[in-house]
Image: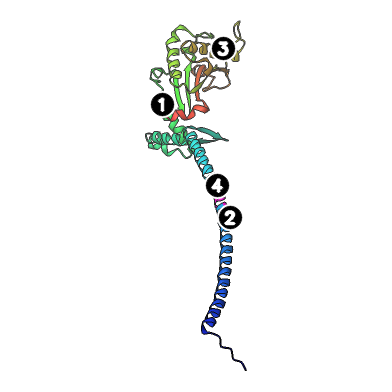
Amino acid sequence: MRKFIIPLGLIVVLASSCVSKKKYAELEQQYKDTHGNLQKTTLQKEELEAKFAKIEKRVENYNQKINSLKNVNSGLKQENDIKLDMVGNTAVISNKTRERMRETLAKVDAADLAEAKTLKDSLNLAISYNLKNKMNTSDLNNSDDINIDIDQTVVMISVSDKLLFNTASYRVKKGAYSLVEKLANVINSEPSMDVMIEGHTDSRTINNASVQDNWDLSVIRSTSLVRELIKNGVDAKRIIASGRGEFFPISDNDNKDGRAKNRRSEIILSPKLDELYNLIKE
């Protein structure tokens, strides 16, 4: 048998060549896997970036809405600071009005304050206090024939007709001009209040060339007083003239003194609703 002797160097070369191809194949596969993973990761990264961009956009929109709501809330707060409204028969007052009311009520007599059980009571008490301090009625208090009553949000000034009119007459007498001027000053001291002038008579009937009955007399006297008040600077748009005849007596019509009390003119000042909160100010 012929023996073949393979050189050792050749064996080494052949062995080395086989190992390199195997490693190459492994490396090539690793490269392919890595490249595939890289592409996959790149796609995932792009998807995440797209999702993140959407999230950023949503966050931006939410921030814009939040800022918008803040502006609306700020506007509502400013509006509430100056607003007075009514819900049904319940007063809804602003923050500033509430603060003014607390400041005013701190000056009110404790006994009167104890009688205020509700928000409406407190509001009326604060307004009444400020009206009494603001409206100068001292010049009108010198006569027993003038009565001034400030009840909650309404000011009532009752003047005996003997100070304003002659018997059975509806013209304001000249001697009453100074009194009318004082009444006008009181009315003009609080321009946020509307004014109603009510004429009242006693129960005795009247019928002459000028007036037919007590309705006529009470209305015409009221209108005459309104004209004199306008001459003294009271805004005609604020005044309402009315007559009650003999149907709202404050005393007995069976005697002279009672009838004299019933013959009167009442000046009623009541606040305009849209300016009511101003009456809480000092």
What secondary structure do most residues of the magenta stretch adopt?
A: helix
Assign a secondary structure to mark 2.
helix
Q: Residues within 10 Å of mark 4 (few under 14, many from 20)?
A: few
Q: CA distance from mark 4 to mark 2?
A: 15 Å
Name the secondary structure under disc 3.
Answer: helix
- The residue pinned by badge 2 equals 47
What is the CA distance from the residue labelled 3 to the residue labelled 2?
89 Å
- Say whether disc 1 or disc 3 marks the residue closer to the N-terminus: 1
Tell me where residue 140 sits by quadrant. top left
Residue located at (39% from left, 17% from top): 139
Mark 1: which amino acid? Lys
Residue 170: % across, % down:
54, 9
Query: In this rendering, does residue 198 appear at all?
Result: no
Q: Amino acid at mark 4?
A: Lys
The percent coordinates of residue 252 (x first, y second) are 53, 22
Q: Which residue is mark 3?
A: 220
Secondary element type, mark 4: helix
The mark nearer the N terminus, 4 or 3, is 4
Q: Earlier in the sequence, mark 4 or mark 2?
A: 2
- The range drawn in magenta is 50-59
Q: Residue tagged by mark 4?
A: 57
Residue identifier under label 1: 132
- Frontmost of labels 4 and 2 is 2
Three-letter code, disc 2: Glu
